[in-house]
Amino acid sequence: MSILDETMVMNDGYEIPKLGLGTWMIDDEVVAQAVRDAVSIGYRHIDTAEGYGNERGVGEGVRTCGVPREELFVTTKLQADFKTYDEAKAAIGESLDLLDIGWIDLMIIHSPQPWAHFHDEDRYFAGNLEAWRALEEAHEAGLIRSIGVSNFEPADLRNILDHGTVRPVVDQVLAHVGNTPFETIDFCREHGILVEAYSPMGHGEILRNPAVIAMAEKYGVTVPQLCIRYTLQLGAVSLPKTANPDHMRSNAEVDFVISDADMDALKNVERVTDYGDSSAFPVYWSKE
């Protein structure tokens, strides 16, 4: 069985494909073709976000890919800056309109903090509960099948668990060799929240690590394949991003197993602190 056929069950009973196509930094004008290419290869999980500016194109790709809507799993994200109920409700409606695919399989709060204040001390607990209430309402109405979060740390998750009425199904986090949030992963596992790993290649920076290159050679695989397999063996859904069909195919060829000893070695690779050209994180959008 290909990884593209494998799924995991979220805490609300819905299945989510283990490998998805990330679409960050794929322009709206070209992302529809990327979606069509991915679906033709066998992908059934497409990940987008309001902050990516490509929901319209993703929706076009889903509508024109030739596969029934029911067979596809589409995720989008509520912009991190929206921390009031009214802002969140309006944004949910806009995403539904832009995608135009009938329903959203999974919608998540993109970050506990507005991008301009990412990693500040203020965790925006009250604002996240407002945004969560809007997501819960859309979920209850059947517009969104599942709801979750992204970039949330344990304290942020505890806020939702203690004060919300629906448990998040996922926490989508930056997780890759050289930067794995073990505390958050453990917290999610303890509370039945599935982890999704975005940028499993560390925005490309980990591809130059000599130790990782050597281990990939040991298994006879590419460094991206090793990195994707690493996140899968952490128990996470993996979301590599690419618009290149050859890379899409290669990213799905991960039917090998990293040994326990080598997983331990990868978990202890020197931490990545500089993401080069990706350090600016252009998705960290501002309303101003």
Image: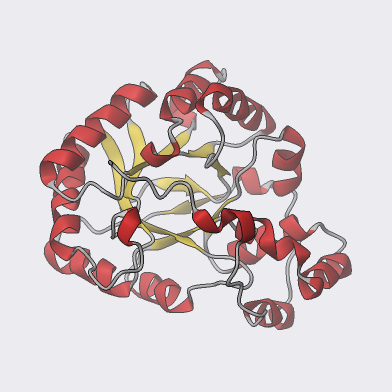
The residue sitting at the front extreme is 288
Instruction: Relative to 84, say whether 272 is above or below.
Output: below
Instruction: Relative to 240, say whether 208 is above or below.
Output: below
Instruction: Relative to 234, say whether 1 is above or below.
Output: above
The coloring applied to the image is secondary structure
User: Which residue is rendered at x = 32% and y = 45% of the image?
Assistant: 286
Q: Position of residue 186 (x, y in %)?
A: 42, 77
Whether residue 255 appears in this view of the structure is no
Q: Quadrant of residue 65?
A: top right
The residue closer to the viewer here, 124 or 169, is 124
Q: Position of residue 62 (x, y in %)?
A: 49, 24
User: Which residue is rendered at x = 54% and y = 59% of the image?
Assistant: 279
Q: Quadrant of residue 201?
A: bottom right
**Image side of residue 109 versus residue 26, left or right:** left
The residue closer to the viewer here, 7 or 127, is 127
Whether residue 175 appears in this view of the structure is yes
Quarter of the picture containing the C terminus is top left
Instruction: Relative to 158, say whether 124 is above or below.
Output: above
Q: Position of residue 89 (x, y in %)?
A: 17, 37
The residue closer to the viewer here, 92 or 9, is 92
**Image side of residue 133 versus residue 206, left or right:** left
User: Which residue is rendered at x = 85% and y = 71% of the image?
Assistant: 214
Q: Give the total number of marks visible in the rendering.
A: 0
User: Which residue is rendered at x = 35% and y = 62% of the image?
Assistant: 118
Q: Quadrant of residue 177?
A: bottom right
